[in-house]
Image: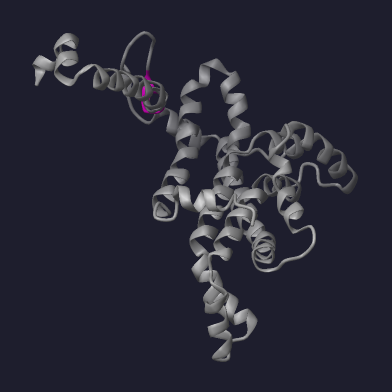
C-alpha cells in the first residue's frame, strides 16, 4: 500500500486519466472540507496559535462562553422562533396557493406562478429597502411580524413551486375515487391529496426552515437590532478578529439543525423532487 504513496508510482499504477481525476478530487476535498475541518478545530480548541496544525489545548471553553452570554443565547432562541413561525405561516398561505396552481386553470395562472420568482431575481437589498419604507408606515420595523414577513418573501418560491409540482403528481382519479365513496372535498384533500403530496411539501418545508435560519440582510434591516438572530450576530463576531472561535461555535450550531433535517428527509430530497417543482405546466 505504502509504495503507492510515491506520486510517480501512483501515476503509472492508475494511469494518466485516473491520476488527474484523483488530483481534481483531492483539490475539491481540500477546498470543500478544509474550511469545515478548520471550523471544528477552532470550535473545540481552548488554545490555538498559528501556524500550528492542531490545537495546543482541546476543550469546550468557547462553548461555555457562548452559552453563558445572554445576548448570544437570545440570538439562538430568536433564530428558531422566527424559522419555525416562518415555516408554519408559509405552509398556511402557500399550500392552498400551490394547490390552486396545480388543479385549476385560470387566466394569468403562469404569470401568478412566475411572480414568486421575482423576489429571487433581483438584488434583495433593494427589495428590503423598498419594503422597509412600507414597514415604517405600518409600524412593522423592529417587530417579529416584520421579520417573519421578510423571511416568508424569501421562501415563497420554494413553498409554492415545489408543493405545486407534488400536487400535479397526484392523479385526479384518486381524488374522484374518494369522492365517490362519500368523502367531501376537504376530507379528500387531507386524507388523499395532501398525504400523497407530502414528499414535495416536506422538501419545501425543509428549504423554508433552512432559508429562514440563514437569512441575515433582511433581518438586520427590518429587525433594527431589536431582533437579533444567529446570522445577524455572526456579523459582529466576524468583525471582531479576536472572536473567531465564537464564530466557529455559532457556525456549528447553525449547521446542526440543517444536518439533522437533511438526514431525516434524505429519502425525499432528490433531483426529481427539486427539478419537478420548477416546471411550469
Q: Which is more toward the observer, 47 or 200?
A: 200
Percent position (x, y) of residue 106?
77, 65
- The residue located at (40%, 51%) in the rendering is 266
User: Which quadrant would the C terminus be assigned to in this image?
Assistant: bottom right
- The residue located at (43%, 33%) in the rendering is 63
Percent position (x, y) of residue 10?
17, 15
Left or right of residue 44: residue 154:
right
Vertical order, 198 against 225 (above or below)? below
Left or right of residue 259: residue 190:
right
In which quarter of the view is residue 163 placed? Answer: bottom right
Left or right of residue 64: residue 137:
right
Q: Which is more toward the observer, 167 or 94?
A: 167
Range covered by the magenta-colored residues = 41-47
Q: Which is more toward the observer, 27 or 37?
A: 27
Left or right of residue 202: residue 79:
right
**Magenta segment includes 181:** no
Percent position (x, y) of residue 145?
74, 51
**Magenta segment includes 43:** yes
Vertical order, 247 against 53 (above or below)? below
User: Which quadrant would the N terminus be assigned to in this image?
Assistant: top left
Amino acid at each position: 500500500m505504502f509504495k503507492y504513496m510515491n506520486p510517480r508510482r501512483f501515476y503509472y499504477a492508475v494511469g494518466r486519466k485516473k491520476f488527474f481525476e484523483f488530483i481534481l478530487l483531492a483539490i475539491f476535498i481540500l477546498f470543500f472540507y478544509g474550511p469545515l475541518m478548520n471550523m471544528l478545530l477552532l470550535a473545540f480548541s481552548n488554545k490555538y496559535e498559528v501556524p500550528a496544525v492542531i490545537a495546543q489545548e482541546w476543550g469546550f471553553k468557547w462553548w461555555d462562553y457562548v452559552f453563558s452570554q445572554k445576548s448570544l443565547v437570545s440570538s439562538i432562541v430568536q433564530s428558531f422562533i422566527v424559522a419555525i413561525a416562518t415555516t408554519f405561516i408559509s405552509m398556511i398561505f402557500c399550500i392552498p396557493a400551490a394547490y390552486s396552481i396545480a388543479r385549476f386553470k385560470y387566466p394569468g395562472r403562469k404569470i401568478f406562478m412566475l411572480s414568486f420568482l421575482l423576489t429571487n431575481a433581483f438584488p434583495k437589498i433593494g427589495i428590503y429597502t423598498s419594503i422597509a419604507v412600507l414597514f415604517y408606515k405600518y409600524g412593522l420595523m423592529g417587530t417579529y411580524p416584520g421579520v417573519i414577513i421578510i423571511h416568508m418573501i424569501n421562501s415563497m418560491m420554494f413553498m409554492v413551486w415545489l408543493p405545486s409540482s407534488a400536487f400535479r403528481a397526484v392523479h385526479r382519479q384518486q381524488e374522484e375515487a374518494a369522492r365517490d365513496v362519500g368523502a367531501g372535498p376537504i376530507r379528500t384533500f387531507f386524507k388523499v391529496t395532501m398525504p400523497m403530496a407530502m414528499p414535495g411539501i416536506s422538501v419545501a418545508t425543509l428549504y423554508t426552515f433552512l432559508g429562514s435560519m440563514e437569512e441575515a440582510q433582511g433581518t438586520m434591516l427590518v429587525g433594527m437590532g431589536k431582533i437579533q438572530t444567529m446570522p445577524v450576530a455572526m456579523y459582529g463576531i466576524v468583525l471582531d478578529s479576536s472572536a473567531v472561535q465564537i464564530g466557529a461555535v455559532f457556525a456549528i450550531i447553525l449547521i446542526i439543525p440543517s444536518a439533522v433535517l437533511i438526514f431525516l428527509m434524505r429519502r425525499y430530497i432528490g433531483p426529481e423532487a427539486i427539478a419537478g417543482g420548477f416546471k411550469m405546466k
